[in-house]
Amino acid sequence: MSFKIINVEAACGTNVGAASTFNDSTEVRLVNTGSTMRLITVANAADTTLGSFTLAPGEVTFIRKNKTDQVFAAHAEVLGLGIVINNGK
């Protein structure tokens, strides 16, 4: 898979008040740089939780979200990056 980077990788906020839209990205790459499983949460612009999942230590995953949806994690060792996935390119 290839993707275009559209902002700078940064530590995820650890609560909804510190959550990020990753510059209004609709696709976000997440990596858990720590050694503990971490909960990832996606909330809408009104700070209502839309869903959550657990990211294993060292795991990398990609999520799709609405531009105004926000992402936060249980620990700042989870890093996020706004991207555009190049399907088959």
Image: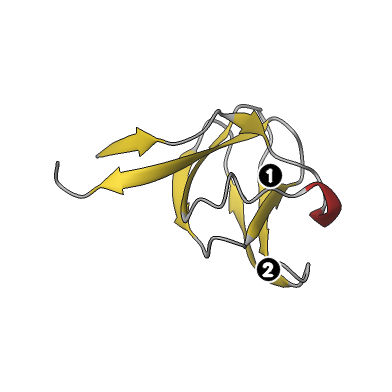
Which residue bears the numbered disc 2?
44
Residue at 76%, 38% in the rendered image: 75
Of tags 1 and 2, which is closer to the observer? 2
- The location of residue 70, given as percent across then percent down, is 66, 57
Residue 88 image offset from top left, x and y in percent: 14, 46
Which quadrant of the structure image shows residue 8? top right
Given the image, on which type of amino acid does mark 2 rest?
Asn
Dot 1 falls on a residue whose secondary structure is strand
Of the pair 10 and 51, the residue shown nearer to us: 10
- Asked which secondary structure carries label 2, the reply is loop
Where is residue 7 drawn, in percent x and y?
Answer: 51, 33
Q: 3 or 1: which is nearer to us? A: 3
Residue at image point 61% right, 62% down: 68
Q: Residues within 10 Å of mark 1 (few under 14, many from 20)?
A: some
Quadrant (top left, top right, bottom left, bottom right) of the C terminus: top left
Q: Earlier in the sequence, mark 1 or mark 2?
A: 1
The x and y percentages for residue 78 are: 65, 35
Mark 1 and mark 2 residues within 8 Å of each other at the beta carbon: no
- Nearest the viewer among 37 and 2 is 2
Q: CA distance from mark 1 to mark 2?
A: 20 Å
Q: Residue 79 got which mark?
A: none
78 over 46 or under it: above or below: above
Q: Residue at x 45, y 45 (%)?
A: 61
User: Which residue position is annotated with label 1?
Assistant: 38
Quarter holding the N terminus is top left
| Quarter where residue 9 is shown | top right
Q: Residue at x 80, y 44 (%)?
A: 14
